[in-house]
Image: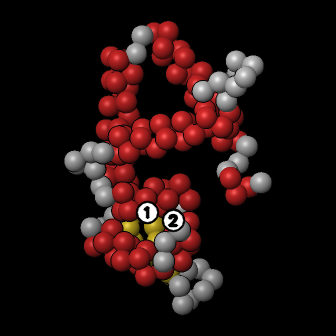
Amino acid sequence: MTTDNGAPDPAAVGAELRLVVGQFVRLVRADADEVAPRLAAVLGRLDRSGPQTIRELADAEAVRHQSMAATVAEVEARGWVERRPHPTDGRMVLLSLTTAGRIVLDAGRQRRARWLADAIGSKLSRAEQRQLAQAIELVKRLIATGGPGDR
């Protein structure tokens, strides 16, 4: 993973980072009690972005409208989202997170945060914990550059 001058090869580091981050995200999400990823994605998006239409959710998650409508029907049946009239277009509805939806979302987040804190505390030395904190700052700088489609 180094270049001729001994420096790390950015292409190799980037490829490895992409793979490791993907594995890490899948590991953190792999929880038997966890809400299905497609359902959690809707809850998370409504939490972060506020009320949205099915079309907005579908576009944001890069899925077909029909697929998102089925997912919304499922979270709505569980009482995790509610429909409200759109304030400017009577033909549309806005979906909002309910209190029950927020509880489910927060419980999953707290469970994952506890697991991660326990893993960091028990598997990494103090020096490694400091390295991890520094690496997080580096990843934040990479995020600030925008994604592949932003060039």
Say whether residue 137 is visible.
no
Q: Secondary structure at mark 2?
A: helix
> Which numbered disc covers residue 61?
2
Q: Nearer the viewer, residue 107 or 65?
A: 65
Q: In the rendered structure, which amino acid carries the disc numbered 2? A: Glu
Q: Residue at x 67, y 29 (%)?
A: 9
Q: In the rendered structure, which amino acid carries the disc numbered 1? A: Val
2 sits left or right of 110 in the view: right
Q: Nearer the viewer, mark 1 or mark 2?
A: 2
Answer yes or no: do the residues labelled 1 and 2 have beta carbons within 8 Å? yes
Q: Is residue 75 above or below residue 104?
A: below
Say whether residue 30 is visible.
yes
Q: Nearer the viewer, residue 127 or 9?
A: 9
66 sits left or right of 123 in the view: right
**Residue 74, horizontal then vertical, whole percent:** 30, 72
Looking at marks 1 and 2 on the same chain, the residue that comes earlier in the sequence is marked by 1
Disc 1 target residue: 42
**Circle 1: is it few (<14), some (14-19), or many (20+) Cα within 10 Å?**
many
The image quadrant of residue 80 is bottom left
Q: In the displayed orientation, state which residue is furthest to the left.
A: 32
